[in-house]
Image: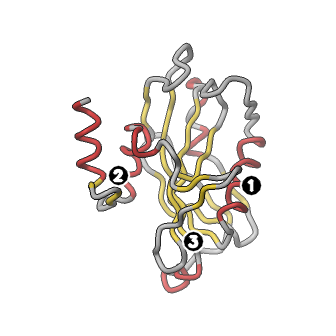
Amino acid sequence: MFGYVTVCEPELKVKDLKKYRAYYCGLCRTLKEDYGFMGQMTLTYDMTFAVILLSSLYETSPWGYTEQDIFVNGMWLCESSLAPHQMLSLLQSLEQGAGRERLIHWGPRTLDLDIVLAFDEDGTMISICDESLTVPHPYFWDRTFVLEPLQELLPTFTYKGMTIGERLTQLSLS
């Protein structure tokens, strides 16, 4: 509906994917007059980053600071040789390239990219909690605007003994 992501990198072959970490990255922006940008970005990187899948984009009400326009949210599945902190730096550089300014906590943004989940080369979920990075994202399991696009890309995901579908149902009832 909103376009596609073009990746300027040699195509990764399925047999090579075991060399890479998998990152599920949340995308968000509030400048709705130009949100097609999220689906039409061209990413050029040196064999370190490939967007494999892009979810649908969802229009949602603001969360946290609510005095702003609607958000547009989605999710990328990325394969990368980057370690989690390196991936965070890459995502922050993409945000800066899109003109991101951090003026209000949970406020309007041209682009917000978060590592929601990460898996190592063997498919084991990565868990990190330090001063610069927390993975899984600390609020992902409580936000339908994160879980809905994540469910498109990872429909069988289970966390804390509950499937993603069960969690979405639980959140819709509360």
- Residue 58 position, x and y percent, is 42, 36
The N terminus appears in which quarter of the rendering? top left
Q: What colouring style does the render use? A: secondary structure
Q: Are marks 2 and 1 in contact (CB under 8 Å)?
A: no
Q: Residues within 10 Å of mark 2 (few under 14, many from 20)?
A: some
Q: Nearer the viewer, residue 63 or 17?
A: 63
Q: Real-space Cα distance between discs 1 and 3? A: 15 Å
- Residue at the image position 72 percent from the left and 47 percent from the top: 92
- Residue 159 position, x and y percent, is 35, 57
Q: Are marks 2 and 3 in contact (CB under 8 Å)?
A: no
Tell me which amino acid carries mark 1.
Answer: Ser
Image vertical order of residue 150 relative to residue 36, above or below: below
Tell me which amino acid carries mark 3.
Answer: Arg
- Residue 109 position, x and y percent, is 65, 29
- Residue at the image position 49 percent from the left and 49 percent from the top: 75
Which mark, residue 89? Answer: 1
- Residue at the image position 60 percent from the left and 56 percent from the top: 129
Q: Are marks 1 and 3 in contact (CB under 8 Å)?
A: no
Tell me which amino acid carries mark 2.
Answer: Gln
The C terminus appears in which quarter of the rendering? top left
- Identify the residue under disc 2: 151
- Identify the residue under disc 3: 21
Mark nearer the N terminus (2 vs 1): 1
